Amino acid sequence: MIEIMVNLQGGARAPLYEKIYNYMKKEITEGRIPQGEKLPSTRLLARHLSVSRSTVEMAYEQLLAEGYIKAEPCRGFFVCDITELYRLGWVGKENAQEKPDAEPAAQEENECVRIDFSPYAVDTRHFPYNIWRKISKAVLLDDREELLLAGHGQGDYGLRRAIAGYLHQARGVNCRPEQVIIGAGNEYLEILLMQILKPGQRVLMENPTYQQAYRTFANMGCEMLTLPAGDFGMNAGRVRACRPDIVYVMPSHQFPLGAVMPLEQRLALLKWASEREGRYLIEDDHDSEYRYRGKPIPSLQSVDSLGKVIYIGTFSKSIAPSLRVSYMVLPPGLLECYRESCGFYSATVPRIEQEILKMFIEEGHFERHLNKMRCIYRAKHYFLLGDLKIMRFVLFVQ
């Protein structure tokens, strides 16, 4: 068992539990406390640091919620494998965070439980209300008149810079803030995109697929083509046979089947796109924040060196659907087309909301929220799989 030495006197003014949390998180992420290492008990560490036991418990609870440590009954606390966790090193670390929500009370044994299996739903019980409220108050207390004006049509530069930094570290996306366009939902960005490209595009999608995107492209006058969704995504040979202009893919987590496209298949699609001018791949990075096994899968855009991938993402699943903030990363070759055909459009996301989201990302709250929700969703994921295995066994025996 290691010895924890935390300087609680110097440094920034912050709660003691936050200093302990920040110190231990840094030691774990930088490898000085290795995976599997046993940590001191809350009682022992509190006595060693001359603080209350509740202070240490709050720090441990935050580390538990974000997946940096795990608790084993009758054994203690141990460091987890953190290769799956988001670690956005460029954001601030000295800001207060909320105490993890308490676990909901256990359901009565015979109580009827209704479960929402909608693919669009999120667990709103764990939304960081306190942090969001605090940032909202800080933004409004500044009396910044410029936030009441229309702002840049692509979105405020500060938020675009924060999104570009997050995408580079978490998804491997290579882009500048000038390439990022912020809009109120994916549908708006897809409508915008069809105005940037030539009219009458032939768009190829998988079947089944994300119907909102299919209907949006159809309403914009595109000729819609489909291919059956396979276990490994679209086959480049079948794509060529369909002769599309645009291929819409979800390579990291196909909706709704969840397939992951292998690198060989991705490179084949990029080769197809490079063979003729005007061909593009639309990468909808659906639900990419939540992967429960192995390391995060890099985006298709991260291996695109020819400017053929148009990347689309959203905060609807990672924060809340009502936030209505999505983003599109255009290849450099399409930026001039955007400015000529759509550069006069006003921003569709209020600047106050943009500023709140920017601060939420830059101050490290988004990173903490993602790690916390990944732990919660992973537990639900494995619980459901366990129940399905039991049901399968019971049906087999019967």
Image: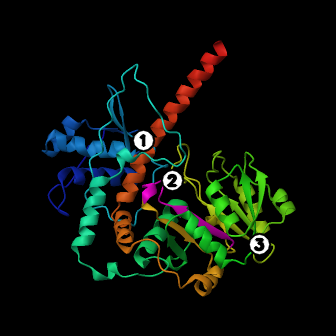
Query: What is the C-alpha distance between the residues marked 1 and 3?
Result: 41 Å
Task: Specify start and end residues of the magenta stretch as a single range.
Answer: 308-322
User: Could you say where residue 153 lies in the image, as x and y percent from the top left?
Assistant: 48, 80
- Nearer the observer, 363 or 154: 154
Q: Quadrant of the N terminus?
A: top left
Residue 33 visible in the picture: no
User: Could you say where residue 221 lies in the image, as x and y percent from the top left?
Assistant: 72, 70
| Residue type indicated by callout 3 | Ser
**Which residue is denoted by mark 3 in the rendering?**
274
Q: Is residue 309 magenta?
A: yes
How many dots with numbers? 3
Q: In this rendering, would 267 be left or right of 111?
A: right
Tell me the element at label 1.
helix
Task: Tell me whether the residue at label 3 lies in contact with that at label 2, contact meaning CB atoms closer than 8 angstroms.
Answer: no
User: Could you say where residue 238 lies in the image, as x and y percent from the top left?
Assistant: 84, 57
Query: What is the C-alpha distance between the residues marked 3 and 2?
Result: 29 Å
| Residue type indicated by callout 2 | Glu
Task: Identify the residue at horizontal 49%, vertical 31% (top origin).
Answer: 383
Q: Which badge, 3 or 2, comes first in the chain's sequence? A: 3
Residue 289: image tag: 2
Relative vertical location of residue 108 with respect to residue 116 in this rendering, above or below: above
Q: Quadrant of the C terminus?
A: top right
Tell me the element at label 3.
helix
User: Could you say where residue 100 lies in the image, as x and y percent from the top left?
Assistant: 30, 45
Task: Identify the residue at horizontal 81%, vertical 72% (top origin).
Answer: 275
Q: In this rendering, would 233 be left or right of 189?
A: right
Taking the view exactly as shown, the residue that stands out farthest to the top is: 398
**Which residue is denoted by mark 1 in the rendering?**
376
Tell me the element at label 2.
loop
Residue 35: image tag: none
Using the rendered view, name the quadrant where residue 55 is placed.
top left
